[in-house]
């Protein structure tokens, strides 16, 4: 009976606490972690989330007890993947914005034959080769610099790890020697610097 009461108290604590506040804390921890490591493992993410939650509301964290593991898995199992996907989409959008008149559009759900045809276009190859060239009407920036600035417009000091990840995605996306436009860990990790996933 004592154990059942404890379990009920833990569940009530979870249900009665401000979920939006907890979610915001966990999202903040994920964003912070992504600045240090693009591919953290489960334990690193959980440790980061625990740290931020303890800092934010240690009393609530203490009430979770054995429910923390379940709560973490249920709520945030795919959060890092979602955040990486969102970041990847922002990078692709920035690529199209910066090569606006030069780069033909392509759908994210394009068939393999459409992707192959798109990658073979001279315009795609030209954009790939211009990634690190200075922009004609903006001598202070390369296309890659502008892409990075578009992805993180409010950030002054973008972590090198995120810059490396953005460069990897841009190069893979525009490289005419592959038929890839959808990014996945299996595609990005071998192409990117070791620090991205160590």
Image (cartoon, rainbow, N blue to C red):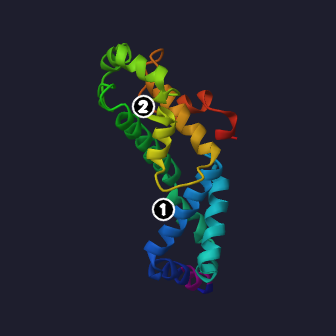
Q: Is residue 30 above or below residue 189?
A: below
First of labels 1, 2 by sequence position: 1
- Counting from the top left corner in percent of width and height, residue 141 is at 50, 37
Residue 195 figure quarter: top right
Q: Which residue is located at x 61 percent, y 31 percent?
A: 192
- Counting from the top left corner in percent of width and height, residue 173 is at 45, 27
Residue matched to label 2: 182
- Counting from the top left corner in percent of width and height, residue 179 is at 43, 19
Whether 33 is among the magenta residues is no
Whether 4 is among the magenta residues is yes
| Mark count | 2
Secondary structure at badge 1 equals helix
Span of residues in magenta? 3-7
Which numbered disc covers residue 75? 1
Q: Is residue 43 above or below residue 114?
A: below
Q: Which residue is located at x 54 percent, y 63 percent?
A: 28
Q: CA distance from mark 1 to mark 2?
A: 26 Å
């Amino acid at each position: 009976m004592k154990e059942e009461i404890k379990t009920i108290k833990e569940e009530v604590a979870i249900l009665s606490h401000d979920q939006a506040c907890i979610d915001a804390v966990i999202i903040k921890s994920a964003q912070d972690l992504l600045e240090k490591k693009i591919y953290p493992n489960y334990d690193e993410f959980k440790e980061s989330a625990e740290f931020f939650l303890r800092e934010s509301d240690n009393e609530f964290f203490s009430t979770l007890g054995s429910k923390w593991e379940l709560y973490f898995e249920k709520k945030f199992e795919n959060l890092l993947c979602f955040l990486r996907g969102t970041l990847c989409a922002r990078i692709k959008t920035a690529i199209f914005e910066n090569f606006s008149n030069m780069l033909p559009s392509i759908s994210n759900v394009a068939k393999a034959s459409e992707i192959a045809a798109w990658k073979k276009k001279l315009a795609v190859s030209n954009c790939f080769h211009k990634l690190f060239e200075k922009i004609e009407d903006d001598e202070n920036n390369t296309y890659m610099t502008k892409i990075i600035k578009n992805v993180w417009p409010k950030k002054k000091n973008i972590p090198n790890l995120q810059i490396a990840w953005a460069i990897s995605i841009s190069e893979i996306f525009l490289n005419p020697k592959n038929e890839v436009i959808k990014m996945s860990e299996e595609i990005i990790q071998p192409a990117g610097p070791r620090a991205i996933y160590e």
